[in-house]
Image (tube, grey):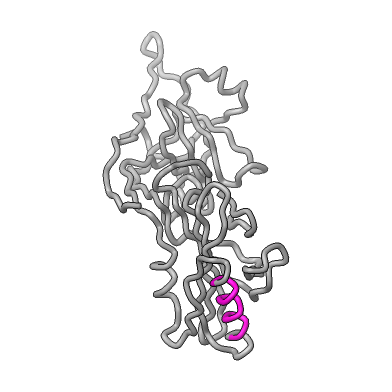
Amino acid sequence: MQAGLAAREPYGMTGHRSVAALFVMLGVSGCAGGQKAPPAAPAGTVRFTTQAHFKDCDIVATARPLADAQAVDCGDARASEDRLKAKACVEAAEAADKPFIAIFHLPGIDSAVSKALLRSSNGERFQLWYDSDPSGGNGRYQSHISRRACERFVPDPDFEEDLRCESQAEGTTLCLGTEYDLGPLQSAANLMCLHDESFRAGFFDCALRKNVKRLVDLGYKPVSAGTLLVCKSEGPGSFSCSSSSQADAEVGVRFEREPPPDASPKGGP
């Protein structure tokens, strides 16, 4: 969760195991009397998670290979005194126009948080941000590392042991504690989803079309044509879904997106 004194980035043992398949069979409804229903409007498409892979993201192991060979090593700072030394080292390297790497382990409220500050020999600056569990709580394998380009590193006015990445850039995900394999592309005609851009852009709560009236009353809508969702099960008939690469990380899926097909696939798996 959020570090008490550090700005939050906008997701033990290393394990690898499979979970039960989360496929959802998308049924086709028949009609009384053998008559066919009028063709429905084209639906969006969806891929469901099928298998999970678990690991604990490691900011030191991730950051070190990204540093230049000639970079000044400002340390792996855990204690308060060490963070102050690392900060001074970064500022000295910046003044000398030298590449560097510094790793700060910061106080957190309900999870462990760390950052790595790097500058390359060509002057590129970037920050890696690690959170052992961005949602807080005690969930395992929820760790997350993101990368963000920085214009400069400046003293943090709220925490004298830290430097802040000044940036307008969006962060990109380098590591997720839980990653998923995805099933085949199929029609999303049997899903209804609740989408609130003001809450989380590209993120949907979705459910199977069982009690349609209740879902409509709650604001759920059919998946629009041209929408490609990536969904993981949150329980019987309930899913967390993403329609963007940014929201994929929040759902817990790393997925190279391609444009959805012109027409929705017919039927289901």
Chain part drawn in magenta: 82-92
Name the residue nearer the viewer: 211 or 94: 94
Asked if residue 155 lies left or right of residue 102, the reply is right
Name the residue nearer the viewer: 179 or 41: 179
Q: Residue at x 44, y 44 (%)?
A: 230
Q: Residue at x 64, y 88 (%)?
A: 95
Question: Horizontal and vertical percent for residue 248?
Answer: 48, 49
Judged from this view, the residue extending furthest toward the right is 157
Q: Is residue 237 visible?
A: yes
Q: Decide whether residue 27 is among the magenta residues.
A: no
Q: Residue at x 39, y 20 (%)?
A: 29
Q: Decide whether residue 89 is among the magenta residues.
A: yes
Name the residue nearer the viewer: 125 or 4: 4
Q: Check the image and report above or below for 19 versus 64.
A: above
Q: Check the image and report above or below for 252 versus 125.
A: above
Q: Is residue 248 visible?
A: no
The majority secondary structure of the magenta stretch comes to helix
Q: Quadrant of the C terminus?
A: top left
Residue 83: image quadrant is: bottom right
Question: Horizontal and vertical percent for residue 162?
Answer: 62, 68
Judged from this view, the residue extending furthest toward the top is 33
Judged from this view, the residue extending furthest toward the bottom is 96
Asked if residue 85 lies left or right of residue 143, the reply is right
Q: Number of labelled discs?
A: 0
Question: Horizontal and vertical percent for residue 3?
Answer: 59, 54
Q: Check the image and report above or below for 93 versus 30.
A: below
Question: Horizontal and vertical percent for residue 116?
Answer: 51, 69
Q: Residue at x 42, y 49 (%)?
A: 253
Q: Check the image and report above or below for 130 versus 191.
A: below
